[in-house]
Structures are given as structure tokens and as C-alpha cells.
Image (tube, rainbow, N blue to C red):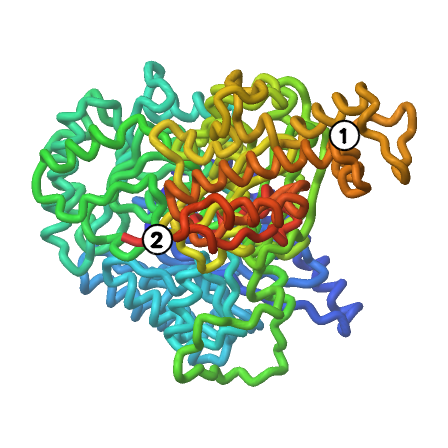
């Protein structure tokens, strides 16, 4: 783990006043407790060893402090927090208005392997007195530092319950062994990712004591992402003439299991950065064994005096996050690159083996064998200045409420002795304990000609909650409404116990799903051509976004939730206001070279047919769509050929396709002839599809599907090739194909990348 620290200048008088005020508050608190002895609060001790783990623990500490009627917070500070060279960062904790109960000087200087071992021993000598005095109900420790191992060892041997934050993850150094050792000592776990949760279960930890919370630092780092003073921060650390996105942040730490090799890689990285000739903010390495040698390499190359470089030992976390979020690239082996940087889509070059096995977003380019200057330089050329979709693999900004809920559920009366689950628990984990597992869900957006709809859809295809508003007529109003409705749904999802994995958008028109751009819209949606939907939604919600047209989404909905489930080749045809659809071939949706595949409504079935909305003639849509049937119904009505006995029509009632269908069912021969021609046109068009892609199933969707099913099946049996005559035509059972299809893009494709 790393340090992103800042040297703090605090007025001594202010610090004295702050401490006196805390002392008075503590005495008042004690009086209240003596007057109300029956009100038992959970005594939580949070132990922090360095600035990096404080950035993860501080949001939890603020959350605990905000509920004084339920929790009593004790803070223990040790490790590099108390070292001058690393900024005396315990002052940052005091500045955050936390009362530090104990400060333990536990670091033995030397920055080598022996010093790390001696530091653990020194911590184990000092910790028992502190823990005995504080008598916490539970000790919160973070991550994989050697100081944290000493904390967990002492607490476990003194029968104090331990909550381990960020266990179950995998990286490429001794940190792995330390992290897993702490997990085995801990009684409860708050992990960040689904894979980390599975690792803990595989380590035989009791899954009822594992909380999938997300990373607590995301609660803090997502909120100040759009700080207005970010340019002031950039100029403070990099100089006045630096532009946003035109600088690099470099942070490389020693690999304690291969110190000499990591020093060599560090030198190559510095050479590549000098050659790349961009302004670079470089942070000093952490306190691990090998850090002194890395600093010597940096000074030998004159990095601190180089005009393109700014070297810093410590940067406050809030400022560091701003620098990373607006950087052109981040390089090194910091876990910040594979974790926090992904939340902003910042390009990252991960060098060496220190983060091997970490889950990463698509913003990370790995240079595992960084054996040459040229290889790192080429990676810089590939990554610098790019922008990637925001990734929330490690959190969604709601970790602290989940952790507080988890803490409240801890029963201090249950046996302290840990129990292990042998053999490892299978993947199917209990879903009924709401503080352990949330429902994996998607945010689905459907842009129709009339309405704009947003829904929270769970993995099973159930619509948990739906929001509907009239679709605005202008681009600006429409985008503003989409973002507002999505933000409302995100807020509600926490209370509904739904974890949103991403956003899927279904819209009319021709769509480039690779870029998330609407290329050309239908006539029903105004100002909706050449529109980038992915970027504004992803930037606002910090979620990955998928976009496709409504026909393709209907096919995806059938593939995941409907008749197409388990079918390798099938076609979905939407029969509504227009005619559309999607083709699934070998389990993949066909988009075509210019993204106009499966425009099924514009298959021509006659050279001299009626005019279509596309400008051509004889298209299926010109015969069989709701608009075409309405047109014919109006013609018959004008010629007084529509009304029949038993058909009740109001004078002011608008004529629709429904009237045509009703008239045909009541025996109107003119209406029946129109519908027969429409059914034949649709059937012939589908036959053309059968003869080209040869699917095994045709699914009719939309308001006219139930009417067309039998006639289309009949046309196929009469006119198709013998080999295609028995292909089945079914009617969709899905009530919300557009929303379900949009959700399926997220639920199927929001995968985790593991290098």
C-alpha cells in the first residue's frame, strides 16, 4: 500500500485549543455515560499506521463519529504517521478533529527487511498496554502493511474482535501474505470487490461475516471529483504553465520480495519519463525495504533539479486525487493506479509485478516485464492523453453506510472463537441477509418517441423501480432529464439494496455501440443525431455505459430473459409504430459494418409498394407497421368502408390500427384484405431473413405481435424453402423488452478484468 501525504503547518496555539476542547468534550461524554449506564454503545477502536490507510479509514471514522449515540470511537496512531521524514501525518488526523487516544512510535529506521521485522516486534511490545487500557469491543484494521499485522496479532491474542478492511485482494508482493494472514486473524471482513469476497470464502472464512462494502475512500474521492479549484491545486504542485491533462503523476514503490529488480525498473521508468519530455509530478516511495536505494537512484539522475519534474514527499489525499483525476497519465506500481484512478478514467501504466492479480479497469495498461526504457516509453505514447469510461470495480461511494450497518449487526454475545467453513462455500451464496449481499442490478434507460423511462433492473430481470417522464423536444433538456432521472435512481438504489453495475441505454435510430454514439435518429426523436450518450452519463454517475438501438435491445432481452435464452441463432422482430428488430447469430448480436444490420423494417418486399418513412417504397414497414395500418384504416374510414355492424366508433375518436383489426374480426372484408396483405408482407420479409441467416427461432415482439404470429407462421409454411418451413414463430412474453434489453447489456457485459 502507499502514502499520499502532505506536510502540514498547524498553528501551535490552534492545536492547543483543539486538544483542550476535545478534552472537555470527552469529560462531558463521560458524565453522560455515567448518568445513562444502560445505554450501551459499541466501542470501536480504529488503528491507523500511515497516510495511505488513513485515506481508507477516515471515512469510516467520520461515519462512526456522526453517530455518538450508537458508537464510541477510539483512535490509535502508530507507524510512519509519527516520523518527521514522512510528514508527521498524525497532525492531519488531529486537524480532522479526531481525538487520538494513543500514539505509538513503532518504526525502526533502516528501510530494509530486518527493520520491518524489528518494527513489528516493537509494535507487539507496545500494543498490549494500549489495548488493555482502551478495552475496545472491536478493532478496525486496514489492508496489508506489516504494522497492521502487528495490530491484528495483538488483538487476536487479547480476545478483541477484529474487522479487517480490504481483505481478500491479490497483489504481487509480500503484501499478499500479510493481507491473508490478517484475514485469518480477523473475525469480520469488509471487502471491496466481488472477487475479493469469493477469495475470502475460498479461504474458508464464514460468509455470514463478510460484507461486500466497496472501498471507503471512494465515498470521499467521488464527492470532490469536480472541485472548482482543481487548477489551483495543479499549479501549486506543477507550476503555473501546466494545463489540465498535460502532465504525468509518477509513483513507484519497492517490491520487497525482489528489491534489486524493482530498483532497476525504477531507473528505467525515470529514463523513459525524461525522454517523454512532459511535466511530471513524482512522489517519493514508501517506507518499505528498498526505498532508500530508490531515492538514491532518483537523486543520481538529477530528477529533483530537472525542469520537467516536481518531486514531493507528501501530498494531501484530497489534492492528490485531484491531481490524478486531471492527469494525462499515471505511471508506476501504486495501488492508487489500479484502484482510485479507474474511478476517473485516468490512463494508467502499471509497471512490474507489484499489482499482479489486482482487478483493474480498462484504463490500466500493464508493462509486466519492464526490462527496457523503450518498452516503457512506448506505453507512455499509447496511454498519455487518453480518457476511459469511469470504473467502479472498487466501490460506488456508499461503503461507509454499509459498514456502519454491518457494525450495528455484530452480536457481542456470540462466541468470540472463529469458525471456518470447510470445504469452501460454493458460489451460490445466501441472498437473504441484506447487509452481506446486495442485489446486482443495472440502470436501464429507454428513449422512446413519447416517453423517457429509467428503471432499476435486477439480475433476474425484475423491474425493481421505474421512472417515467415525457421525452423533451430539445437535446439539452433531454440530456438534463436523463442525468437527473439516473441520479434519482442511483440514490434510491441504496435504500432498495441494489448495487448498480452500470447503465444501459436503448434508443431509436442507428447507434454505434462501440463508441456509445447515436449516429442518426428516427423522426420521432428530435435533435438526436451525432449524440455521444456514453461520456456525459459515465462522467456524472461514475459508471460504465452501454448504448444500442431499441431493436437490438429487444433481441438482447429475449436472449437473457425470454424465448431466446439458450438459443444460439434467433431473430426478434418488433411490430409496433414501426418495424425493427435484432439478429442473434452464434450467440452474438449482429451490428454490421456501419451499424445498420437488422433494419428489418426496411427489407423490400415489393418494387412498387407504398412509400416508406425511409424514402423508399415497398418496405415491410410501409405495409405492416402500426403507422401503415393506421394509414389504411383512415383511408377506409374516409371511403366509409371501415365501420361494420357491432363496431362502436365515436365521431371525435381518432382512427387507429386497432379499429382496422376490430373491423376485420367483425367480418369487414376490406379491413381483412388490408391485414392479409400486411401479414403476407411481414411473412415474406421474415422468410428473406430465414433464407439469409437461417435462425432456429423467430420472436415477434410489440403491440401487434399477438395478431401477426399465426398469419406469419402460415406464410412461412407456405412460401419458405422446405428446410425453413418448420422454423417456429413465437410471441414475446416480456412486458418491457427495451428496458430489459438495456439492462442485459450491463448485466452480461459489466465484467471484471483480471490481468
Query: Residue at 51% of width from left, 76% of height from top?
Result: 160
Is 690 in front, or is 566? Answer: 690
Based on the displayed image, in which of its 4 quarters is residue 490 positioned? top right
Q: What residue lies at 72% left-to-right and 61% top-to-bottom? A: 69
The residue sitting at 44% across, 82% down in the picture is 421
Q: Residues within 10 Å of mark 1 (few under 14, many from 20)?
A: some
Residue 144 falls left or right of residue 369: right
The residue tagged 2 is 359
- The answer to whether residue 351 is above or below residue 237 is below
Label 2 vs label 1, nearer the camera: 1
Q: What is the x, y in percent for residue 23?
A: 63, 54
Name the residue that disc number 1 marks: 656
From the viewer's side, name the closer residue of 320 and 295: 320
Q: Is residue 518 left or right of residue 703?
A: left
Q: Find residue 557 and report its horizontal and vertical position in percent.
A: 54, 49
Tags 2 and 1 touching, CB below 8 Å = no
Dot 1: what SS? Answer: loop
In this picture, residue 630 sits left or right of residue 192: right
Mark 2 neighbour density, 10 Å: few (under 14) some (14–19) many (20 or more): many
In terms of image quadrants, where is residue 595?
A: top left
Which x, y percent locates residue 293? 14, 47
How far is mark 2 from mark 1, CA to CA? 54 Å
Residue 18 visible? The answer is no
Q: Nearer the viewer, residue 644 or 201?
A: 644
Q: Nearer the viewer, residue 114 or 664?
A: 664
Amino acid at each position: 500500500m502507499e502514502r499520499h501525504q502532505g506536510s502540514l503547518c498547524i498553528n501551535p496555539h490552534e492545536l492547543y485549543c483543539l486538544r483542550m476542547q476535545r478534552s472537555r468534550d470527552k469529560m462531558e461524554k463521560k458524565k453522560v455515560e455515567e448518568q445513562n449506564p444502560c445505554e450501551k454503545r459499541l466501542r470501536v477502536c480504529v488503528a491507523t499506521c500511515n497516510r495511505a490507510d488513513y485515506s481508507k479509514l477516515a471515512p469510516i471514522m467520520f461515519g462512526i463519529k456522526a453517530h455518538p449515540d450508537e458508537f464510541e470511537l477510539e483512535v490509535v496512531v502508530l507507524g510512519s504517521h509519527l516520523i518527521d521524514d514522512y510528514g508527521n501525518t498524525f497532525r492531519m488526523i488531529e486537524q480532522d478533529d479526531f481525538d487520538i487516544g494513543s500514539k505509538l512510535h513503532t518504526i525502526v529506521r533502516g528501510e530494509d527487511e530486518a527493520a520491518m521485522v524489528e518494527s513489528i516486534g516493537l509494535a507487539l511490545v507496545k500494543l498490549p498496554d494500549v489495548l488493555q487500557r482502551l478495552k475496545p469491543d472491536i478493532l478496525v484494521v486496514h489492508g496489508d502493511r506489516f504494522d497492521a499485522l502487528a495490530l491484528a496479532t495483538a488483538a487476536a491474542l487479547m480476545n478483541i474482535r477484529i474487522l479487517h478492511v480490504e481483505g481478500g485482494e491479490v497483489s504481487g508482493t509480500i503484501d499478499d501474505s500479510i493481507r491473508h494472514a490478517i484475514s485469518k486473524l480477523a473475525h469480520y471482513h469488509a471487502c471491496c470487490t466481488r472477487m475479493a469476497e469469493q477469495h475470502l470464502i475460498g479461504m474458508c472464512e464464514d460468509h455470514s461475516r463478510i460484507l461486500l462494502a466497496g472501498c471507503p475512500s471512494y465515498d470521499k474521492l467521488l464527492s470532490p471529483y469536480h472541485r472548482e479549484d482543481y487548477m489551483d491545486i495543479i499549479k501549486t504542485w506543477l507550476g503555473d504553465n501546466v494545463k489540465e491533462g498535460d502532465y504525468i503523476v509518477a509513483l513507484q514503490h519497492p517490491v520487497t520480495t525482489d528489491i534489486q529488480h524493482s530498483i532497476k525498473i525504477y531507473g528505467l521508468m525515470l529514463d523513459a519519463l525524461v525522454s517523454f519530455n512532459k511535466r511530471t509530478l513524482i512522489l517519493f516511495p514508501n517506507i518499505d525495504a528498498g526505498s532508500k536505494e530508490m531515492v538514491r537512484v532518483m537523486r543520481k539522475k538529477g530528477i529533483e533539479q530537472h525542469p520537467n519534474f516536481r518531486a514531493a514527499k507528501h501530498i494531501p489525499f484530497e489534492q492528490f486525487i485531484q491531481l490524478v483525476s486531471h492527469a494525462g497519465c499515471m505511471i508506476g506500481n501504486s495501488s492508487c493506479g489500479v484502484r482510485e484512478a479507474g474511478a476517473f478514467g485516468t490512463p494508467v501504466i502499471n509497471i512490474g509485478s507489484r499489482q499482479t492479480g489486482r482487478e483493474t479497469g480498462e484504463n490500466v495498461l500493464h508493462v509486466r516485464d519492464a526490462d527496457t526504457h523503450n518498452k516503457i516509453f512506448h506505453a507512455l505514447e499509447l496511454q498519455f492523453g487518453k480518457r476511459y469510461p469511469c470504473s467502479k470495480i472498487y466501490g460506488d461511494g456508499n461503503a461507509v453506510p454499509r459498514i456502519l450497518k454491518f457494525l450495528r449487526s455484530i452480536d457481542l454475545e456470540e462466541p468470540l472463537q472463529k469458525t471456518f467453513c470447510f470445504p469452501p462455500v460454493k458460489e451460490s451464496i445466501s441472498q437473504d441477509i441484506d447487509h452481506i449481499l446486495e442485489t446486482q442490478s443495472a440502470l436501464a434507460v429507454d428513449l422512446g418517441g413519447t416517453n423517457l423511462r429509467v428503471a432499476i433492473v435486477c439480475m433476474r430481470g425484475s423491474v425493481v423501480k421505474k421512472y417515467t417522464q415525457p421525452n423533451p423536444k430539445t437535446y439539452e433538456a433531454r440530456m438534463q432529464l436523463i442525468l437527473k432521472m439516473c441520479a434519482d435512481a442511483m440514490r434510491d438504489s441504496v435504500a432498495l439494496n441494489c448495487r448498480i453495475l452500470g447503465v444501459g441505454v436503448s434508443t431509436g435510430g442507428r447507434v454505434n455501440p462501440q463508441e456509445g454514439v447515436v449516429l442518426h435518429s428516427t423522426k420521432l426523436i428530435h435533435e438526436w443525431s451525432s449524440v455521444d450518450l456514453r461520456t456525459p452519463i459515465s462522467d456524472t454517475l461514475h459508471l460504465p455505459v452501454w448504448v444500442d438501438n431499441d431493436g437490438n435491445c429487444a433481441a438482447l432481452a429475449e436472449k437473457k430473459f425470454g424465448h431466446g435464452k439458450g438459443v444460439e441463432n434467433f431473430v426478434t422482430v418488433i411490430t409496433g409504430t414501426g418495424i425493427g428488430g435484432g439478429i442473434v447469430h452464434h450467440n452474438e448480436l449482429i451490428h454490421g459494418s456501419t451499424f445498420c444490420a437488422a433494419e428489418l423494417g426496411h427489407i423490400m418486399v415489393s418494387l412498387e409498394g407504398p412509400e416508406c418513412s425511409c424514402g423508399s417504397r415497398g418496405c415491410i414497414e410501409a405495409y405492416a407497421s402500426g403507422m401503415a395500418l393506421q394509414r389504411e384504416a383512415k383511408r377506409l374510414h374516409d371511403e366509409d368502408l371501415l365501420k361494420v355492424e357491432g363496431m362502436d366508433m365515436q365521431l371525435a375518436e381518432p382512427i387507429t390500427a386497432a379499429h382496422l383489426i376490430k373491423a376485420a374480426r367483425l367480418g369487414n372484408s376490406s379491413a381483412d384484405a388490408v391485414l392479409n396483405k400486411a401479414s403476407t408482407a411481414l411473412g415474406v420479409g421474415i422468410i428473406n431473413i430465414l433464407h439469409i441467416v437461417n435462425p432456429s427461432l423467430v420472436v415477434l415482439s410489440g403491440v401487434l405481435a399477438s395478431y401477426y404470429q399465426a398469419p406469419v407462421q402460415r406464410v412461412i409454411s407456405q412460401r419458405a424453402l422446405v428446410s425453413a418451413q418448420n422454423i417456429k414463430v413465437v410471441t414475446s412474453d416480456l412486458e418491457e423488452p427495451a428496458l430489459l434489453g438495456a439492462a442485459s447489456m450491463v448485466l452480461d457485459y459489466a465484467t471484471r478484468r483480471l490481468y
